[in-house]
Amino acid sequence: MTTSYEQFLRQKVKLAPRSGFEVSLLEINPLLLGHQSAAVKWAVAGGRRALFEAFGLGTTIQQIEVLRLILSRAGGRGLIVAPLGVRQEFTRDAHTLATGDHPNITDEQREQLAAWIAKDPTRAPSIRFIRSVDEADETGLYITNYETVRDGKIDPADFTATSLDEASVLRSFGSKTYQVFLDLFQQVAYRFVATATPSPNRHKELIHYAGYLGIMDTGQALTRWFKRDPSKANNLTLHPHKEDEFWLWVSSWGLFLQRPSDLGFPDDGYDLPKVHIHYHEVATEWRPTVDRDGQVGMFSDAAMDLQSAAREKRKSLDARIRETASIVAAEPDEHWLIWHDQEAERHAIDKAIPGAVAVYGSQDLEEREQAIVDFSNGRIQHLAAKPVIAGSGCNFQRHCARAVFAGIGFKFNDFIQAIHRIVRFLQTRECHIHLVYADTEREVLRTLERKWRDHDATVKKMTDIIRKYGLNHAEMGQTLARSIGVERIEARGEGWLVANNDCVAECGRMVTDSVDLIVTSIPFSNHYEYTASYNDFGHTDGNDHFWAQMNYLTPELLRVLKPGRLACIHVKDRILFGSVTGAGAPTVSPFHAEAIFHYLRHGFDYMGMITVVTDVVRENNQTYRLGWTEQCKDGTKMGVGSPEYVILVRKPQSDRSRGYADTPVVKDKADYTRARWQVDAHALWRSSGNRLLTAEEMAQLPPDVLSRVFTEWSMAEIYDYEHHVRIGEELELRGALPAKFMSLAPGSHHPDVWHDVARMRTLNGEQTKRGLENHVCPLQFDIVDRLIRRYTNRGELVFDPFGGLFTVPYRALHLGRQGRASELNPGYFLDGVKYLEAKQREKAMPALFDFDDDMEASA
């Protein structure tokens, strides 16, 4: 059955797939509270879900119950992976769920539990710690540490279902290990994550969780919701217009729960303790510093980055540890958590606070874990640790309500996790957090506090979504589907008509055989998204999905184009990163080739392709794939710069026995001379006699002049590769070779390879001047002008279905043609209309209009 365009768009709505089992509340352990049972039911139904719940809401018992229910359906064995020192929490909670043996459980609840288990004895959970799969039976629930999996002692593929407890701890292993670790679980059918603080401000971490759970490929998620910085690879920020959609999508697979009332349950017994933050600023001992130039520093610089922060920590070590010891000594009967970041701090704490037990990375795992367990149970009074070691998963609130940070840093997640070891639900006392920092670390403190505010704001956003939708995915999907469609707005003037509309719908309104030329830059698959609408062609999953949407547009383009006339399609190949494809090295997706065959399939004739060369240095700054250093390490990794292309396709003329269009584009030989034709057709350019400037002469020129002079010379002389390289090398020795753009670009000798496109001469330049949002893929004036002049007669109609800022109709008016376009983005539409109105006013002023070409030629 043929899918309608509207059905196709509705299928774009992305919520997490459901791959689990429906269970009734009667199957869930009766000891679980209302919010816990609701979360378990939701997670089991999803099959791959994340429990992002506030500290103390009970993710431990939820994980146990989720895996028990999954295994009761799917069979096999389950594995929980947890940080060091946490296994006793799972053992304790599993025992409670099986027996009701807990001081907070009433006799009535125990009787209810016993009757529930009597109906099916397998409902009583048990959990066992293992360090290898050989210690496990064929069925059952097991727990191990992250280190065991990381070191290859346990293969997650041997388990039916797994859950990562406090998965954020993985970041302390390093980003490479983090990615490898998550990949180990891809063969596990049912996967879960439970962490109280998933760092919602770290969007990429959330996306990695989605990739781990199999919700969406990480590369696809990054492309769908984040915009790229064109000057630097991997610098990603969330599109403002995609923010609500992004968080709705996250909420479809991740449960952000701050209080039971967020799901409509009472908050009885869930009151966070009052928290007192105490600030202790210590003076840094002044020591003269000498920089590389021999200049002596009079004052200590404020710590603004990781390097300077580490330097200031070393300088203030003694003062901070003295203050830390004084804080602990002031309340000698209290249990204290002493947080630090450096080994030097650990050794200093050991001397300043006798009796403090330290846990550290090189320590034996059993010894380290036992110390954490003993402090949790109150057998140790003072515990000193780094947040990356004991700051995740451990529950210390039973005996401790005091923590002191012997220093502060930029790592907010480690900081907030460490605080919530004691600041959590079920803490019965007020908590006191002491922050010790140097006077030169005030900026670090301000950064930490800003991240805390941002964190609270994002958590509130997630809480609002849960409060609004609950766990109702259908309602979330309906909300997202409302962004499908657009109310058409039309603007017109003398010789032009444009519409704010979906291009498929707009083409459907147009008369058959009414367009003389199509010039457009189609979206480069899902490389960019231009609007929040699902109508956006950039809002697709990949090339196949993009071309599937184009299948609705291209037949309309063929219909509206006059027989024998051309569609000029601007495209560019896609760079695929090795970390996403698994190829290891960056490769190229031949998007331009896919475009050619797409238009052939829809009845167009292929007429050829124009190549527009690009700046290889600038491209490398964007993709990091053509680096000089990497080329020197291994030349096989490096391909070539990725040019832009203009695909020329033609609607078949009515009379196939003759090659002429039904309405041919006629040129007067008096104006279009044989000489000009030869240049257009073959164009072998000869030297004018200008010589190559020496490196000394060229080094004195500004970079923009240097670029122009060199390109003009290369067009006049026989090309010499070695000479070209030597010029660059000599310029580099003199410090005159720019790193941000290619100053020695070779000129092209072929008319279909254009080197002289003024890449900054676009309507985007005007947008930048006016402080407006830039259109992310503007089409250059030079390209549009050449195509219009070559393939239309004066007075004919030029159409662009992806109008953007309406460059095509703008230039059509400028060249004495008519213009029409559609554009989905309302902001681009409104700005484009202003440009067209301004161009129309120019046409009413003969003096300016008549000399416009000459003015441009002299610019």
Image (cartoon, rainbow, N blue to C red):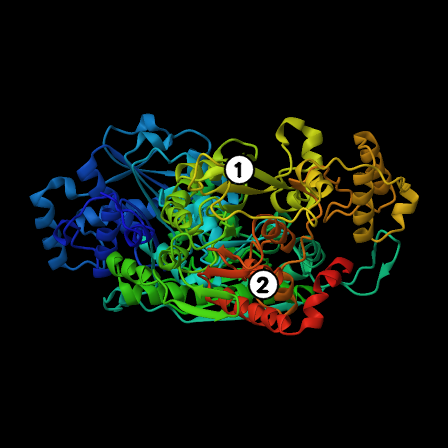
Q: Residue at x 75, y 35 (%)?
A: 684
Distance between the Cα atoms at labels 2 and 1? 26 Å
Mark 1: amino acid: Met
* Circle 2: element type: helix
Q: Is residue 708 visible?
A: yes
Q: Which residue is mark 2?
A: 813
Q: Which is nearer the eye, 434 or 841?
A: 841
Pick whichever, 314 or 174, lies toward us: 174
**Residue drawn at point x = 36 percent, y = 42 percent:** 214
Taking 331 as reference, is 209 left or right? left
Tag 1: Cα neighbours inside 10 Å, few (<14), some, or many (≥20)?
A: few
Residue type marked 2: Leu
Question: Pointer 2 and pointer 1: residues touching (CB < 8 Å)?
Answer: no
**Residue under numbered circle 1:** 607
Q: Secondary structure at mark 1?
A: strand
Q: Which mark is residue 553?
A: none
**Whole-percent x, y for residue 289 in the image:** 82, 57
